[in-house]
Image: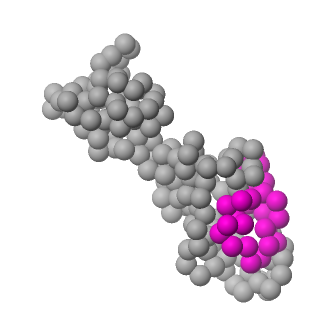
Amino acid sequence: MGIIEGGIGPYQYAGDPTTQQGSDAVQTVVLTGTPTAGAYKLQFESSQTADLAFNADAAAVQAALEALPNLGVGNVTAAAGAVGSTVVTFTGTKGKQPVQPLTVASSTLDAGATLAVEQTTPGVAPSGVGSAKGALLIDTENGKLYQNEGTAAAPTWVAR
């Protein structure tokens, strides 16, 4: 991926900016074993969730994460994954960018159960983040001109 250069514009970029539209970070909380009791907490950056029951469903995990002051409502979704797992996708203001991994802050799960967080998909920022709507970009490899029809936080480059 090239680097955006320039001041007032148009910006210069080595390569087609439409090939890097960004991706949301996806992490999977994996429970192994068959606990019958206990609870756990997840941590994002410096904030920890409230206790989550050993059998918490995806909705409970999402609600706990959205309650964190450094995440908030609309910035994460959770869905049931393979047996014993919950897939967490960072969206909204946390979407289309690298994010810190979730960690297991504490666990009192019984029956030898363990909990881990795996990074399924790293978040990747789209090309030209910070370029205002309407900004122009010249692909220095093929001489094409592109214009941002998205926002500065989530640019959408369209060939002109």
Q: Point out the image quarter for the N terminus.
A: top left
Q: Is residue 60 magenta?
A: yes
Q: Residue furthest left?
A: 142
Residue placed most toward the observer, 46 or 93: 93
Place of residue 66 in the rendered image (x, y in percent of width and height, measured from the top left): 70, 53
Name the colour scheme. Answer: one colour
Place of residue 150 in the rendered image (x, y in percent of width and height, measured from the top left): 39, 34
Q: Residue at x 80, y 73 (%)?
A: 53
Q: Residue at x 44, y 32 (%)?
A: 151
Q: Horizontally, is 113 left or right of 121 in the view?
A: right
Residue 136 lies in quadrant:
top left
**Which residues, given as a range, are shown in magenta?**
39-64
Place of residue 3 in the rendered image (x, y in percent of width and height, measured from the top left): 36, 30
Q: Residue at x 78, y 63 (%)?
A: 41
110 w.r.t. 144: above or below: below
Residue 103 lies in quadrant:
bottom right
